[in-house]
Amino acid sequence: MRDMKTILGVLLIFCMIGAVVMIVRGVIIWARTSREELLGNGPSQSGLQQNKMMWGRIKFQAIAVVIVILLLLMAKGSAG
C-alpha cells in the first residue's frame, strides 16, 4: 500500500509539472502572437497551438485530480 502511495505521489508531481509546463508554453505562444495573426481570417497557427496547450493542461489536471482522489481513498481506507 505504501509503495502505491509513493508511485501515485510521484505521478501527481509529474502531472503538476506537466500542467505548469503547458501553461508556460501557452503563454509564450500567446506572447509571440502577431497582430496580423489576430486580424486574419479563420483560426491562426498560434491560436491552434494555444488551444493544444490548453487541452494538454486540462488533461494533466484531470489526471492529477484522479490521483488525489485515489490517495484520499487510500488514506481513508488505512485510517479505519
Image (cartoon, rainbow, N blue to C red):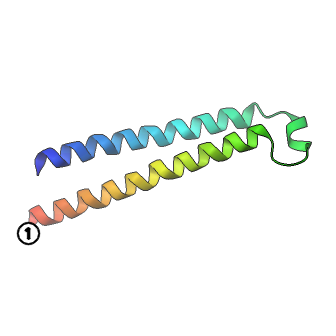
Hey, which quadrant is residue 46 in on the image?
top right
Taking the image as shown, residue 23 lies to the left or right of residue 44, namely: left
Where residue 80 sits in the image (x, y, percent)?
8, 69
Point 28% across, 40% down: residue:
10
Point 66% across, 47% down: residue:
51
Hey, which quadrant is residue 44 in on the image?
top right
Q: Is residue 39 above or below residue 34?
A: below
Count of labels in the image: 1
Hey, which quadrant is residue 40 in on the image?
top right
Q: Residues within 10 Å of mark 1 (few under 14, many from 20)?
A: few
Where residue 34 sits in the image (x, y, percent)?
84, 33
Where residue 69 sits in the image (x, y, percent)?
30, 61
Point 26% across, 59% down: residue:
70
Q: Is residue 76 above or below residue 60?
A: below
Task: State the residue lying farthest toward the bottom.
Answer: 80
Where residue 9 sits in the image (x, y, percent)?
26, 44
Question: Which residue is identified by label 1?
Answer: 80
**Residue type marked 1:** Gly
Secondary element under disc 1, as helix, strand or loop, is loop
Taking the image as shown, residue 31 lies to the left or right of residue 78, namely: right
Point 49% across, 43% down: residue:
19
Taking the image as shown, residue 74 lies to the left or right of residue 49, namely: left
